[in-house]
């Protein structure tokens, strides 16, 4: 059996690292007295008077709130199976388009707008088109990865309706499936020059017991450029399962106690804090300030839930698809927490 640390070490080398951003001064945009982009300037508008959403945008991927009661039983069962397999069949891990996956509403994208269509280009070279020429939403469009979208203006808000998604994609990176009857409704509203809010609703009675709703706050990334991030090797060779990994070594409670504390670092360009706690002979890591939902009865399913850390040695641990190890001083006290993700290693310095 290949342990998770070995798996992570292998795929760190095959997964694109965080993109490198260029410095390029955009012409003809509002600026403050010191020359920086004025993100609070008024919303730009096109010749038709509607807000112009064009630009390069970035936002924190949403953590969609859901629990077992929001899913049809067959979907909840799939979620548990996929968690057991470290989500290895997630389309993104297979080098396939992510489609409507909720995580997709965050991250980097370029918006190109004309009066009759809006194109959204992602950094993985996928795209979608929103038709703005007054056409009706088709009743039975050919199923595709990105679906079929039409839009219209409601005052200054762009309303988008999308159908026609194939059932190969996921609705959530936590293994939640949908049917080909999925309907996605979006409301895009640019609140000033540098900020935009996107409200999204997923409706699919065949998979969900009620609609899902979530919002994403986007920020304009002026004076830079978006580079491509392409998947070059899929998860076909991933082996092992969550059950296989839950065969821990024994670490004395007094050693675990030395790791209890708060650790802060940078993830995705933003500050992130982990709190490590102990309960008896068990150690847990929690991302501070991120919502923790019901988790479908599976510990750690939600990103903000306490993750049980399964020891592999006195300093190395695993927890639901991530590796964790502690840098310690000569007295065995932890000075930093290193979190191993498929995209690389992230260091969090101990604060207390």
Image (tube, rainbow, N blue to C red):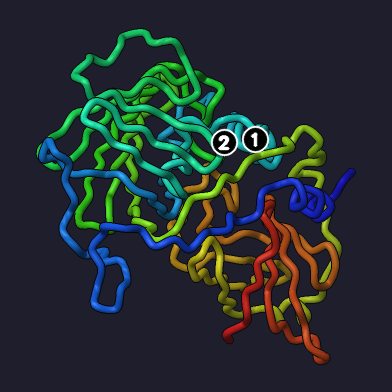
- Quarter of the image with the C terminus is bottom right
Could you classify mark 1 by the number of other residues whose Cα lies within 10 Å: few (under 14), some (14-19), or many (20 or more)?
A: some
User: Outermost residue toward the front?
Assistant: 27
User: Outermost residue toward the right?
Assistant: 1
| Percent coordinates x, y for residue 337 in the rendering | 68, 73
Residue at 74% over, 74% down: 326
| Percent coordinates x, y for residue 30 in the rendering | 23, 63
In the rendered structure, which disc, 2 or 1, sits on the residue that comes first in sequence? 1
Task: Note whether 296 is above or below 253 in the view shown.
Answer: above
Tag 2, which secondary structure?
loop
| Percent coordinates x, y for residue 244 in the rendering | 81, 45
In this view of the protein, which residue sits in the foreground, 111 or 342?
Answer: 111
C-alpha gap between disc 2 and disc 1: 6 Å
Q: Is residue 81 visible?
A: no
CB of mark 2 within 8 Å of CB of mark 1?
yes
Q: For this view, does 96 lie left or right of residue 146?
A: right
Q: Disc 1 marks which residue?
A: 82
Q: Disc 2 marks which residue?
A: 175
Residue at 55% over, 70% down: 266
In this view of the protein, which residue sits in the foreground, 30 or 288?
Answer: 30
| Percent coordinates x, y for residue 283 in the rendering | 68, 68
In this view of the protein, which residue sits in the foreground, 229 or 47?
Answer: 47
Q: For this view, does 27 lie left or right of residue 179?
A: left
Task: Note whether 121 is above or below 43 in the view shown.
Answer: above
Tag 1, which secondary structure?
helix
Residue at 39% over, 50% down: 56
Q: For this view, does 115 lie left or right of residue 49?
A: right
Task: Note whether 308 is above or below 110 in the view shown.
Answer: below
The number of discs equals: 2
Residue at 60% over, 56% down: 18
On residue 137, the disc is none
């Amino acid at each position: 059996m290949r342990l998770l640390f070995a798996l992570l070490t292998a795929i760190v080398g095959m997964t694109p690292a965080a993109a490198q951003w260029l410095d390029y001064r955009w012409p003809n945009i509002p600026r403050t007295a010191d020359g920086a982009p004025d993100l609070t300037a008024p919303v730009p508008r096109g010749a038709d008077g509607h807000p112009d959403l064009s630009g390069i945008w970035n936002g924190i991927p949403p953590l969609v709130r859901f629990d077992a009661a929001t899913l049809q039983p067959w979907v909840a069962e799939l979620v548990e199976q996929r968690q057991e397999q470290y989500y290895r069949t997630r389309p993104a891990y297979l080098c396939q388009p992510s489609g409507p996956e909720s995580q997709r509403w965050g991250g980097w994208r370029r918006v190109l707008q004309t009066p009759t269509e809006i194109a959204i280009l992602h950094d993985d070279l996928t795209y979608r088109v929103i038709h703005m020429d007054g056409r009706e939403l088709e009743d039975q469009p050919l199923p595709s990865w990105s679906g079929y979208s039409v839009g219209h203006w409601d005052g200054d808000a762009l309303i988008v309706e999308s159908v026609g998604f194939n059932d190969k994609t996921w609705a959530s990176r936590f293994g939640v499936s949908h049917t080909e009857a999925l309907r996605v409704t979006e409301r895009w509203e640019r609140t000033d020059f540098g900020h935009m809010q996107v409200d999204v609703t997923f409706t699919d009675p065949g998979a969900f017991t009620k609609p899902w709703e979530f919002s994403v706050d986007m920020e304009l990334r002026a004076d830079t450029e978006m580079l491509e991030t392409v998947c070059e090797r899929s998860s076909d060779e991933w082996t092992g399962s969550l059950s296989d990994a839950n065969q821990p070594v024994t670490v004395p409670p007094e050693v675990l106690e030395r790791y209890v504390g708060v650790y802060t670092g940078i993830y995705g360009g933003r500050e992130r804090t982990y709190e490590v706690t102990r309960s008896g002979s068990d150690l847990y890591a929690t991302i501070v300030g991120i919502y923790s939902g019901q988790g479908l009865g599976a510990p750690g399913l939600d990103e903000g839930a306490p993750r049980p850390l399964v020891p592999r040695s006195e300093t190395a641990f695993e927890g639901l698809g991530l590796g964790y190890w502690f840098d310690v001083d000569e007295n065995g006290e932890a000075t930093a927490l290193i979190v191993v993700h498929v995209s690389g290693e992230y260091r969090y310095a101990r604060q207390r």
